Amino acid sequence: MEFNNIVPGMTFEKEFVVEEEDTAVHFGNDNVPVFASPRMIAWIEGTAIGTVALFLPEGWETVGTSFNLAHIAATPVGMKVRVVAELTEVKGKLLTFAIKAYDEVDKICEGTHGRAIIELEKFLSRVNVKGKN
């Protein structure tokens, strides 16, 4: 299947507010109550998904394949974070996104994120038999 409507240059952004459960404290860094990298990665994935989700046919999704990100500034609880994903490369079913994230003061993240377009039913059938042989 071809995905001619998914092309470089597509962008999407989402805004979030950092809550207590988004901090490093909740990811094992008990004494650092600032926005956690694992939560940032989750927000980046959701934003990248949003870039192409409306352009995928029924039964198709994307899954994360790579992350090359620099978390370059800390963000306190209560501050807004804006994540921007730009599709920069399409190689068949492989997508590359340029990622930037900003809080209300600084750029807090930049890098790239890879995703693959998958046919969900086929993908899950392969995963569900994994380890059963």
Image (cartoon, helix red, strand yellow):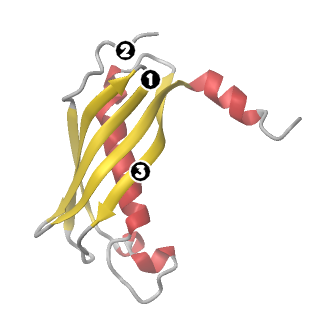
Residue mark closest to the camera, 3 vs 2: 3
User: Residue type at mark 3?
Assistant: Phe
- Residue that badge 1 annotates: 93
Q: Is residue 101 left or right of residue 61?
A: left
**Residue lying furthest left:** 105
Q: Is residue 81 left or right of residue 95?
A: left
Please state which of the two labelled residues, at mark 2 or mark 1, is closer to the viewer: 1
Q: Secondary structure at mark 3?
A: strand
Q: Residue at x 42, y 19 (%)?
A: 92
Mark 2 or 1, nearer chain start: 2
**Residue on which the image places disc 2:** 3
Locate residue 44, reporting x and y percent: 34, 50
The answer for how far apart the CA atoms under marks 3 and 2 are is: 23 Å
User: Residue 47 falls in which quadrant of the image?
Assistant: top left
The answer to whether mark 2 and mark 1 are in CB contact below 8 A is yes
**Mark 1 belongs to which amino acid?**
Lys
